[in-house]
Each structure stands twice: as structure tokens, then as C-alpha cells.
Image (cartoon, grey):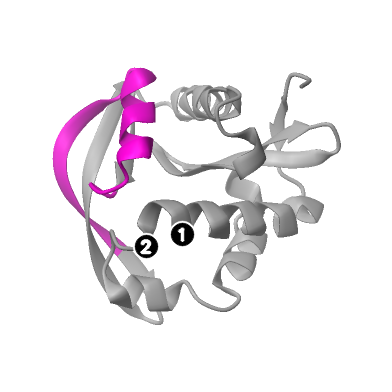
Amino acid sequence: MSEPLIRPARPADAAEVAAIWEAGWRDGHLGNVPDALVAARAGDSFRTRAAARVPDTTVAEVGDAVAGFVMVVGDEVEQVYVGGAHRGTGVAADLLAAAERQVAANGFGTAWLAVVPGNARARRFYERCGWTDAGPYDNPVPHAGEIIPVPCRRYEKRV
């Protein structure tokens, strides 16, 4: 496999980002988050949010396809997902490193992210990449004018 090209997302990437996001989110979150959040993530949720988040998104392109993506806002790494065919290839680590550089470029010395406790695969990955579990964090997820509190672990890394 060729090395991934890490680049800013373009509007044309939104459909591939949405498909990767939905599949990855379901893998890591079903059974690990409140039912209200599962219900909120139905229908066109991922397509709508992927299109709206293009400015915050960096993708890894392998060949002519999006292999994964990361979204960064300020000091937070909000989303990190890799398509199933590219898991275990180093794409996720490349994306996470790009996110860390973005956080530093945004003027912050520490990056953070939230991960649900039951997503053991993600937690192991972050720890292998030098991130530290900084404790419990209730992630306030907005949906339809309300907040869905999602119990998470806050991970941090000096950048």
C-alpha cells in the first residue's frame, strides 16, 4: 500500500468521510453510549455533519480514496476514524500526528480528546501514541437544541 497523503478535506470528500465516520462510530460506540445518542446518530446524521465539518477535517488519502479522517477544533481532537480496510496500516497514527500538529499550530501546548470507556481498541491506540488518560469527562453532545451527556474518559497529550 502506498503512503497516505494527509491533506485538508474538500467538499467532494464529505460522502466518503461520512461513510467512514458512521461505520467507525458504530464499531466503537454501540453499547457504550446512551440510547439517546444512538437515536441521534440515525438517518442522515453523519452525512449532514461531515458536509458541515469540511473546514475542520483533515483526510488521509490512499490511492484515489479517503482512507480516514480527523477533525480538530482549537485544542480538541474531536473525531479520528479510519476505514476498515485501512485499520492497522498506520493511517490512524498519521492522522493523529497531523491533529497534534494542528493543535500546536492553533497555539495550544496540550491536545485533548474524549473517548467512551468501552471503546477499548481506541483507548489502547491513544495510549500507544503517547496519550494519557486524564480522568472522567462528561462529554456534552448537542442534539436538536438539547445536550446529551455522554460519560467519557478525557485523554491528553503535550504537543
Q: Secondary structure at mark 1?
A: helix
Task: Decide: few, some or many residues near mark 2? Use Cα within 10 Å; few <14, some 14-19, many ≥20.
Answer: some
Q: In the rendered image, which quarter is residue 91 located in?
A: top right
Numbered mark located on residue 26 in the image: 1
Q: Quadrant of the N terminus?
A: top right
Residue closest to the eye, 39 or 49: 39
Q: Which residue is at the far left?
A: 135
Q: Is residue 45 visible?
A: yes
Q: Magenta segment range?
A: 116-140
**Residue 3 point in image, percent of width and height:** 74, 19
Task: Report, in whole angstroms, how far the alpha carbon at label 1 lies from the one at label 2.
Answer: 5 Å
Residue placed at 33% from the left, 65% from the top?
Answer: 141
**Residue holding disc 2:** 30
Residues tagged 1 and 2 counted as in contact (Cβ below 8 A): yes
The kind of residue on which mark 2 rests is Leu
Q: In the rendered image, which quarter is residue 103 located in?
A: top left
Please tell me whether residue 120 belongs to the stretch shown in magenta.
yes
Residue placed at 64% from the left, 49% from the top?
Answer: 55
Position of residue 23 in the picture relative to residue 47 (left or right) = left
Q: Quadrant of the C terminus?
A: top left
- 34 in relation to 130, above or below: below
